Amino acid sequence: MKEERIKLLEQETKEEQRILSTNAWHLARYVIEHDYELKLPQDFDMGKFIWYAQHYLELEKDDKIKFINQYMMLEKATKNVTARTLVATRIHGRGFLYAVFGTSVGKYLFFLAIVTLTFVLLLIVNITTNDNVMPDILIPFWAAGLGTCVFLLRITQEKLSTRQFDPAFIPSQLIRLSLGILAGGLIVLFPDLIHPPQNGSIAEGINIGQSTLAFILGYAVDIFYSILDNIGGKVKDN
């Protein structure tokens, strides 16, 4: 049993080292392509670093330490562009289907596109349909969700174009989607803010103004919650 654990640990260690060497190669390639933007020591030997990356498993202990130090120096120079973001955003030559369904970034974007399209269709159906097929009270939630999706798509596009998108942050972005829907949708609790209800019904108080505000709250959810945190902090201090 102990021998099996040792073998398993050795396999995991070799796999992690293989990933490290692969990531180092991607990092070195990025540095070479953007050498004019980055500041590296003049005595840095990129060829030696790439050789270390390719033969990492066979390196002596001192050479491994030297390689790791160089690796950390490169990641410090590239700042938000890390080996992990480079690997995650490298889909050139793999084809569209692989980019969408074979990568974590592609799957996330596909999910985000479906959610965005769903919110758009729900709003269109509500606007073009005279019958009250769906409760009007849900409109702000849909508008807020659309606003959050637009923000996430914009941020993701920006991060992908600079190769800074890290799949590790996908869960936090999905949480942001939930918070955005909640923040914008809560406008239904304040029907008097834009248009007072005629008969005391919240649904009757919802109009295009509240939907627009819900969209903005969903898009700028960080500002909304920072205001709440500020109010909560003042209350706590008092």
Image (cartoon, helix red, strand yellow):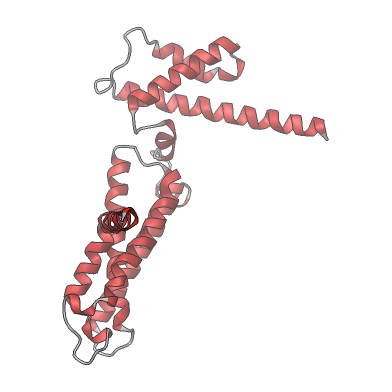
Quarter of the figure with the N terminus: top right
Q: In the displayed structure, does residue 131 sit left or right of residue 96? A: left
Instruction: Please give the name of the residue rendered at 48% of the width and 48% of the height, measured from the top-left corner.
Output: 102
Q: In the displayed structure, does residue 209 sit left or right of residue 179? A: left
Q: Position of residue 15 (x, y in %)?
A: 61, 31
The part of the image, by quadrant, that contains residue 164 is: top left
Q: Is residue 105 visible?
A: yes
**Number of dots carrying numbers:** 0
Q: Is residue 100 visible?
A: no
Q: Which residue extends farthest front?
A: 238
Q: Position of residue 38 (x, y in %)?
A: 28, 21
Q: Nearer the viewer, residue 32 or 84?
A: 84
Relative to 195, residue 114 above or below = above
Q: Which residue extends farthest right?
A: 1
Q: Position of residue 56 (x, y in %)?
A: 56, 18
Q: Nearer the viewer, residue 93 or 82?
A: 82
The part of the image, by quadrant, that contains residue 236 is: bottom left
Instruction: Please give the name of the residue rendered at 29% of the width and 37% of the height, measured from the top-left corner.
Output: 162
Q: Which residue extends farthest bottom?
A: 199
Q: In the displayed structure, does residue 31 sit left or right of residue 9? A: left
Quarter of the figure with the C terminus: bottom left
Instruction: Please give the name of the residue rendered at 37% of the width and 64% of the height, measured from the top-left corner.
Output: 115
Relative to 126, residue 49 above or below = above
Instruction: Please give the name of the residue rendered at 33% of the width and 87% of the height, measured from the top-left corner.
Output: 133
